[in-house]
Structures are given as structure tokens and as C-alpha cells.
Image (cartoon, rainbow, N blue to C red):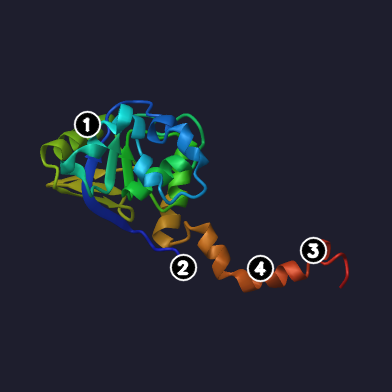
């Protein structure tokens, strides 16, 4: 299956405030033992969302006003800490399709891009205004336009930054390297059959 071309992401927003939100907060380490990523969405921010015996805490990901949101807005150095790919997997499987913030840890941002989840950079004042807007009007639509490199909400349009190689791969639909390899499986088999170290050097 050819990866989807992602020229824009539209949806409702959700805000997680605070600098240096690390991957252990996004997905606690004990859930890394899961054999697949299938349930990762259940564990997003788990220890900040639930207490002892599963008691529900106050957290944006528990707030009914933000259920179904697909654009996460964050502050500085989001996704720092370990390089675990489970963190973007958890966010994506919760429903996040794009993340807008002041800055991101490089490995986290790269892992997001490999899942088709763009990480978009805005200046701090612009992030704060967007956060305030989302919290004041939870159901309002936010648009992240990757072709024009802008974020739109209400009557506001803000110029944004995005890693150009990530933007290009998303817009062209080349971000899912696994799908691209599977699509080229016949060519891969043909090349492999001609490699001497895979055929015991027998031509």
C-alpha cells in the first residue's frame, strides 16, 4: 500500500502545557514490554491521567471537551529523554495526527515523521495564543497546512516552520518507508537473488 500523501491536517486541538515533557511522561517505561503497539493509545500520559487503582486525574487527555482532538499543541523541548518510538506511537494511536509546538527533541520529531505525524514549529507567543484559543473554544477547527507552512485557526493564519525533508516526505507520500519497501518486494527479491553472499556464492 502506497503511503498517504499528507498536505494538510485539520481537526480540533488539545493542549499539554509545560516545557521538557519527556518520553517517560508520554508513555511510562513499563508499557514498553508490550509485544505490539496496538494498545499504546491507552497508555498515553497514563501516570498523569490515572492514580492508584485507576483513579482518574485532571488532565487534558481525560477532559471530555478534547476527546477526538487530533492536533496537539505543546511548549518547548517536547519529547525529550529516551529515543523510544513508543511515545509517538502512543500519541498517534490516541488520535493525534499533528503536533504544533515551540520545539521538539530531534529523535522524537523524526519518529513522528516516520508515522506520518508532522511536528510543526511556532514561536512561543504564537503557541501561547493558540493554546489559549483551544482552551477557550475546544470545538474550533485548527488547520496545519504543510504545503503553505502555515497554521490556521479562527481568523488567524500564522507562518510556521517544519523540517523540509519531513514536509517533503509527507506531502509526496514517501514517509512510510516500510510500505514503500513492501511495494517494491519483487525488485528487492530480484536484487537479493543476485547477491553472492545470499546464494552461497553460487551463480
Going by the image, does 193 lie left or right of 133? Answer: right
Could you tell which of marks 3 and 1 lies nearer the N-terminus? 1
| Residue at (23, 38) in percent of width and height | 62
Q: Which of marks 3 and 2 is in front?
A: 3
Q: How far apart are marks 3 and 2 (CA)?
A: 28 Å
Residue linked to disc 3: 198
Q: Which of marks 4 and 3 is in front?
A: 3
- Examine the rendered structure and indicate whether residue 77 appears above or below residue 73: above
Could you tell which of marks 4 and 3 lies nearer the N-terminus? 4
Residue 96 has which mark? none
Q: How far apart are marks 1 and 4 (CA)?
A: 48 Å
Q: Give the tally of numbered discs.
A: 4
Let me know if residue 113 appears in the view: yes
Residue linked to disc 2: 2
| Residue at (38, 35) in percent of width and height | 26
Q: Distance between the residues labelled 3 and 1?
A: 56 Å
Residue 188 has which mark? 4
* Label 1 secondary element: helix
| Residue at (41, 52) in percent of width and height | 167
Residue 128 has which mark? 1
Q: Name which quarter of the figure residue 129 lies in.
A: top left
Residue count near mark 1 (Cα–Cα under 10 Å), binned few <14, some 14–19, many ≥20 = some
Q: Do the numbered discs 3 and 2 sit on residues whose CB atoms are within 8 Å?
A: no
Give percent across and percent down for residue 58: 22, 30
Amino acid at each position: 500500500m502506497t503511503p498517504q500523501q499528507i498536505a494538510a491536517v485539520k481537526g480540533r486541538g488539545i493542549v499539554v502545557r509545560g516545557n521538557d515533557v519527556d518520553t517517560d511522561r508520554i508513555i511510562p517505561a513499563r508499557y514498553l514490554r508490550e509485544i505490539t503497539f496496538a494498545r499504546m493509545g491507552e497508555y498515553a500520559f497514563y501516570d498523569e491521567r490515572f492514580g492508584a487503582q485507576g483513579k482518574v486525574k485532571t488532565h487534558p487527555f481525560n477532559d471530555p471537551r478534547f476527546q477526538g482532538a487530533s492536533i496537539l499543541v505543546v511548549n518547548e523541548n517536547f519529547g525529550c529523554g529516551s529515543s523510544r518510538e513508543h511515545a509517538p506511537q502512543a500519541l498517534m494511536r490516541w488520535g493525534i495526527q499533528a503536533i504544533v509546538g515551540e520545539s521538539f527533541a530531534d529523535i522524537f520529531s523524526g519518529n513522528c515523521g516516520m508515522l506520518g505525524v508532522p511536528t510543526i514549529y511556532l514561536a512561543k507567543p504564537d503557541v501561547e495564543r493558540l493554546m489559549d484559543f483551544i482552551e477557550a473554544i475546544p470545538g474550533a477547527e485548527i488547520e496545519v497546512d504543510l504545503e503553505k507552512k502555515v497554521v490556521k485557526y479562527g481568523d488567524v493564519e500564522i507562518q510556521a516552520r517544519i523540517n523540509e525533508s519531513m514536509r517533503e516526505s509527507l506531502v509526496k507520500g514517501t514517509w512510510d518507508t516500510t510500505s514503500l519497501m513492501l511495494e517494491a518486494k519483487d525488485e528487492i527479491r530480484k536484487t537479493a537473488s543476485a547477491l553472492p553472499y545470499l546464494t552461497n556464492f553460487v551463480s
